[in-house]
Image (spheres, grey):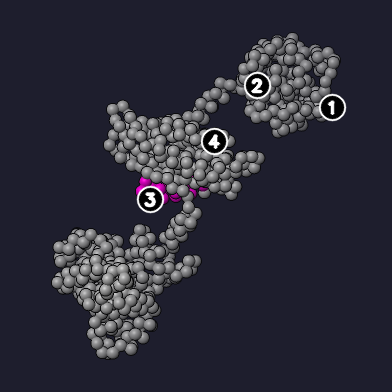
Amino acid sequence: MNGTSEGPAPAADLGPAVTESDDDLAPRTGRTEPPAYRSVFTTAPLAMAVVDAEGLVVSANDTLGTLLGTDPAALAGSVAADLVDLASDAGTWHAYREVLRGHRSRLRCTRRLKRADGHSLWAQVTVEPLADAGDSGDSGDGAAPGLLLSVADVSARRELQARLRHLQMHDPVTRLPNRALFFERLTAALEAESYEHGGTGRIGVCYLDLDGFKAVNDTHGHRVGDRLLAAVAERLTRCAEEAAHARSGAPLVARLGGDEFALLVEDSTGTDQLAELAAAVLAALQPPFELADRRLSVTASVGVVERHTAGTTPTALMQAADTTLYWAKADGRARWTLFDPERNANRMTRQALAATLRPAIERGEFALEYQPLVGMEDGRVRGVEALIRWNHPQFGVLAPNRFIALAEEDGSIVPLGRWILRTACHQARRWQLAHPDEPPIFVSVNVAVRQVWDSDLVADVARTLEETGLAPELLQLELTESAVMGSAGRPLQVLKALSDMGVHIAIDDFGTGYSNLAYLSRLPVSVLKLDGAFVRGFQYDAAASGAGGANPADEVIVEAMVQLAHRLGLTVTAECVETSAQATRLRRIGCDTGQGWLYSRPVAPDRISALLGHAGPGGPAGVQAGVGNP
């Protein structure tokens, strides 16, 4: 009978420790065993054999013969190492030789053995010195006088362990491998030994999430939800089997938790293979699911990642897959999205900016630049728009469109907005004091909706005006159209309180939202700022749109909005004025002020001081500050 291990079994080269002999195979101890010892040895329930110093079986008891399915007498003279598969790996073989020489007290290992009838069993093999009863257990040359080999059948225990491991590593609802087994397989696939000796050296993951699964649980209950998950698992498994690759076999399908599943493709051949698999998964989930008396439909979003195995870690791979799944959700769901390194770099930059926003306020990394507003009738500077810039130590000077949305998301817009308000008002007051002969200028600060909800904006404005000495009528606050139109409750109360204080309220980017024009008349608004998209429509040449070069539709819309604003007692500012032709048409339509590169780019405060210093007598001047787009 031969023993086999779980892996390939190399030929057992016993070397000088075991020799072939034609001598009689009787015990070589040179002594007669006591009858009591022989009786205990023969009838013991534990399978045992006595092994001599050369590694040959001297005698075996009946239990060992029964265990191995052979006559115990036939085992005498057998090479013990071959009998219980001790030579199949170098570590076990070396340890056995150490015990045989008396340099080690015990060897214990688990081996898969094959019986004479062909059946296999798992056995725990123990080898330890068999010393004389009257000596210390060492022979004169340092070698043990013999060994006791004991073999215990642990097949039942191994089977129980296997069942427990299966339960531990599989999801009870879908019977798919769970997160633990998935990461175990993923980690093994990324180890160098798994791809250095063959394979493509690539790996791929399709990470999917069911769209709107929570609604199924909420509507039909968790029992129906579990049945739907099991049905989805069956389709994914079938899809994986159909997509099995000749080299790597079927992808591993696992449930990672909740309504999240993953398909692991080892030895992938490129992104095309993963893209085809993702498309097949979406197609497989498209037909409705028939669950008893219910017919349910479900879609999924899939994040696809495929890359070289070398240099990849399980954490990095799954982070990329999770990010890509989020993109698929954000892009509209019911689709697959491939990992994009450039898009991910932008996401990482965004996260880095978000993490340093609040500390940047404390470190004073922000600054304001100002862009003039010009009276359309006389061409005089009536105001400027101050735009915030972030002097980031790593990414350089950042425009507001890179970080204002982040500030609104994490709430840092509140302290940042306070800083902008205070800085702009201080600067407006300085201009006023520096040019006492000029009419005072107003400053307009853009306000985010979250500032209205998360802070006491009225108190902040009152405190700032008191600290700076700026008159309330010289401050204008801008909110976007979507934030102002339909305002009710706290936002409307705040706007009215500010207006009662004397602060002007302006609607920025007017014309881009869904305005309730009847509601506009009931808001405490004094200024409309036309979105630049309308002004850019004035850039059509004469050949394309007739005499005058304007887009007739845009010009009619702008004229109607200007007339409406004037009838409501509001002034109108046109944004993004870039050519003199646009300015001429806006002046004819009746716009009050214009702002854009035709007049000036955003500049430092001292440049505005220079403009005011050269201004002659005329109407009131103004300065607008804000956090809006340049």
Where residue 126 appears, x then y in whole percent? 68, 24
Marks 3 and 2, how far apart at CA: 57 Å
- Residue designated by label 3: 331
Return the disc, 1 or 2, that comes first in the chain's sequence.
Answer: 2
Q: Residues within 10 Å of mark 2 (few under 14, many from 20)?
A: many
- Residue designated by label 1: 140
Label 1 sits on what residue type?
Gly
Marks 1 and 4, how far apart at CA: 63 Å
Closer to viewer: mark 1 or mark 2: 2
Closer to viewer: mark 3 or mark 4: 4
Image quadrant in which you'd find residue 616: bottom left
Q: Secondary structure at mark 1?
A: loop
Q: Work out whether residue 69 or residue 565 is closer to the camera in this orientation and state it.
A: 565
Label 3 sits on what residue type?
Asp
Where residue 479 appears, x then y in whole percent? 26, 66
Q: Which mark is residue 245?
A: 4
Pointers 3 and 4 in contact (C-beta within 8 Å) = no
Marks 1 and 3, how far apart at CA: 81 Å
Marks 1 and 2, how far apart at CA: 35 Å
Marks 2 and 4, how far apart at CA: 34 Å
Closer to viewer: mark 1 or mark 3: 3
State yes or no: residue 326 in magenta. Answer: yes
* Residue 106 appears in the rendering: no
